[in-house]
Image (cartoon, grey):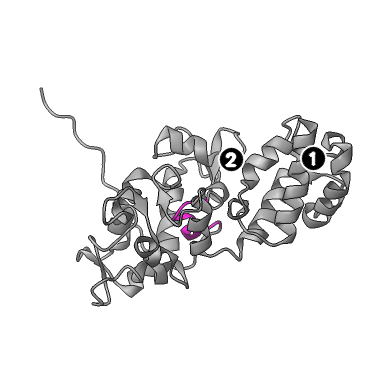
């Protein structure tokens, strides 16, 4: 076990030093690696948890992550190191990271997003996402630009059938309800994501409890990287899913106007 953890420290230093963003790109999951290295599970990696053979790697890791210089790596310092690494990842690298068997395609089992989204992207229905199918999602530029890259007929708008993301997100972005997303609407994707997450966050503590989360229980467990029973916005962004890069960790400036919430539905008479 100690030899495995020693190798883990070396691999983490190699990954971080190389500037690889989400370590899945290097065949490593940074979040899972932290759990393995944190022997006592207290959300801190200290010298006492480091095998003797891994001490040189740990010292190098301190230089990369120990921002308060206390000789240990706390989970927030570790996450900040991950955020610095993630700043340079491209959507194409995200999909490459999902392709675990390196066959140039992403299978349903390898895909990190929701099954319904996989089905929308898999236009030929062969059970794999190939380079042509993911091309719009890996376009260079802002999240809004990637949405506009889905415009197959070149009319300057993205229709419901052209859109490759979750259909509920299409409905949120389609502000004028004309059945299409134009460039201005697409540019607000981060703001719309922020509104969606804060609407779920009923107690406004900046994270989602299991009760607040509106997705599938299995997805909650996947996103809860530190297994604290809640999902932070940063954990969602760090998840590596197709929409992860759209998730803001601070309040965007271009928040669209909120629509008036509907009142509770009346109970049907019996």
Few, some or many residues within 10 Å of mark 1 (<14, 14–19, 20+): some
Q: Quadrant where the N terminus lies?
A: top right
Q: How many marks?
A: 2
The residue that label 2 is drawn on is 225
Q: Residue shown at 43%/70% (left/top)?
A: 139
Range drawn in magenta: 240-249
Q: Residue at x 79, y 57 (%)?
A: 64
Q: Which mark is residue 6?
A: 1
Q: Which mark is residue 177?
A: none
Residue 164: where, in percent of width, then height? 32, 58
| Image quadrant assignment for residue 254 | bottom left
Q: Is residue 243 left or right of residue 79?
A: left
Residue 162 in the image: state x and y as whole percent.
Answer: 26, 63
Foreground pick, 204 / 35: 35
Tell me: residue 113, above or below residue 64: above
Circle nearer the viewer, 2 or 1: 1
Residue name at image x 11 percent, y 26 percent? 269
Q: Quadrant of the C terminus?
A: top left
Q: Residue 244 lies in magenta, yes or no?
A: yes
The extreme top residue here reads 270
Judge from the rendering whether residue 59 lies leftward or rightward of residue 250; answer left or right.
Answer: right
Asked whether the viewer can see residue 260, the reply is no
In terms of depth relative to the viewer, which is nearer, 25 or 61?
25
Residue closest to the far front: 103
**Label located before the other in sequence (2 or 1):** 1
Above or below for 130 versus 109: below
State the SS at label 2: loop
Q: Residue at x 72, y 31 (%)?
A: 41
- CA distance for labels 2 and 1: 22 Å
Q: Secondary structure at mark 1?
A: helix
The answer to whether residue 146 is seen in the rendering is yes
């Amino acid at each position: 076990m100690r030899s495995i953890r020693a190798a883990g420290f070396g691999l983490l230093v190699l990954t971080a030093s190389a500037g690889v963003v989400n370590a899945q790109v290097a065949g490593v999951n940074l979040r899972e690696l932290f759990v393995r290295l944190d022997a006592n599970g207290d959300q801190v990696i200290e010298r006492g948890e480091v095998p003797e053979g891994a001490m040189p790697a740990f010292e190098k890791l301190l230089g990369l992550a120990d921002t308060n210089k206390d000789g240990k790596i706390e989970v927030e310092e570790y996450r900040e190191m991950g955020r610095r690494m993630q700043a340079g990842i491209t959507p194409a690298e995200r999909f490459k990271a999902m392709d675990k068997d390196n066959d140039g395609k992403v299978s349903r089992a390898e895909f990190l997003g929701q099954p319904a989204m996989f089905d929308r992207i898999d236009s030929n229905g062969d059970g794999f996402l190939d380079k042509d199918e993911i091309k719009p999602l890996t376009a260079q530029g802002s999240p809004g630009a990637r949405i506009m890259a889905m415009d197959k007929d070149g009319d300057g708008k993205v229709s419901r059938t052209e859109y490759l993301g979750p259909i509920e997100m299409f409905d949120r972005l389609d502000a004028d309800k004309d059945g299409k997303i134009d460039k201005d609407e697409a540019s607000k994707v981060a703001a719309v994501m922020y509104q969606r997450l804060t609407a779920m966050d009923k107690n406004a503590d900046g994270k989602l409890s299991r009760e607040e989360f509106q997705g599938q229980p299995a997805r909650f467990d996947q996103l809860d990287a530190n297994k604290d029973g809640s999902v932070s916005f940063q954990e969602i962004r760090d998840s590596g899913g197709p929409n992860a890069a759209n998730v803001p960790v601070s309040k965007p400036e271009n928040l669209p106007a909120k629509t008036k919430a509907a009142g509770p539905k009346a109970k049907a008479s019996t």
